[in-house]
Image (cartoon, grey):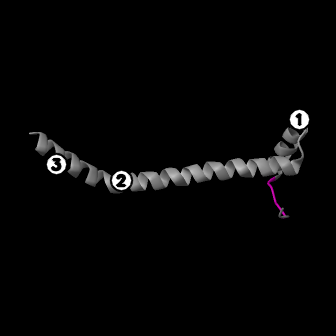
């Protein structure tokens, strides 16, 4: 496990403290879970961007193939 120094805005810290006490959760556990959720969110966002890029790259080829199939049917 890595240790780090973290500077939070006062408002964010106060909200986190309030929530951790209500949830009966250690501050460290709360921050770890928050970072994990944020990592998952950003991985999905990057994956979506990559899929959109690849989809756009293949769309012209797909349309060309579709037109070729249509010619064969006619």
Category of crowding for the residue at label 2, using alpha-carbon neighbours closer than 10 angstroms: few (below 14), some (14–19), many (at least 20):
few
Q: Earlier in the sequence, mark 3 or mark 2?
A: 2
Query: Which residue has dot 3 on it?
Result: 68
Q: CA distance from mark 1 to mark 2?
A: 47 Å
Q: Please name the residue shown 88% across and 42% down the image.
A: 25
User: Where is residue 3 shown, x and y percent of the image?
Assistant: 85, 64
- Of helix, strand and loop, which mostly describes the magenta segment? loop
Specify few, some or many for label 3: CA neighbours under 10 Å numbering under 14, 14-19, or 20 or more. Answer: few
> Residue 56 — which label?
2
* Residue found at x 87% / y 48%: 27
User: Which residue corresponds to mark 1?
Assistant: 22
Q: Which region shows up in magenta?
A: 4-9
Q: CA distance from mark 3 to mark 2?
A: 19 Å
Judged by depth in the image, the label closer to the viewer, 1 or 2, is: 2
Label 1 to label 3: alpha-carbon separation = 63 Å
- Examine the rendered structure and indicate whether residue 5 appears above or below residue 34: below
**Label 3 secondary element:** helix
View extreme (left): residue: 74
Rendered image quadrant of residue 69: top left
> In percent of the image, x 70 and y 47: which residue is there?
37
Contact check, label 1 and label 3, Cβ < 8 Å? no
Is 1 colored magenta in this rendering? no
**Camera-side mark, 3 or 2:** 3
Secondary element type, mark 1:
helix
């Amino acid at each position: 496990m890595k240790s780090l120094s973290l500077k939070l805005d006062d408002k964010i810290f106060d909200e986190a403290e309030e929530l951790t006490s209500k949830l009966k959760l250690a501050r460290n556990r709360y921050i770890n879970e928050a970072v994990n959720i944020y990592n998952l969110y950003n991985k999905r966002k990057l994956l979506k961007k990559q899929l959109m890029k690849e989809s756009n790259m293949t769309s012209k080829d797909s349309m060309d193939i579709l037109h070729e199939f249509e010619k064969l049917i006619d």
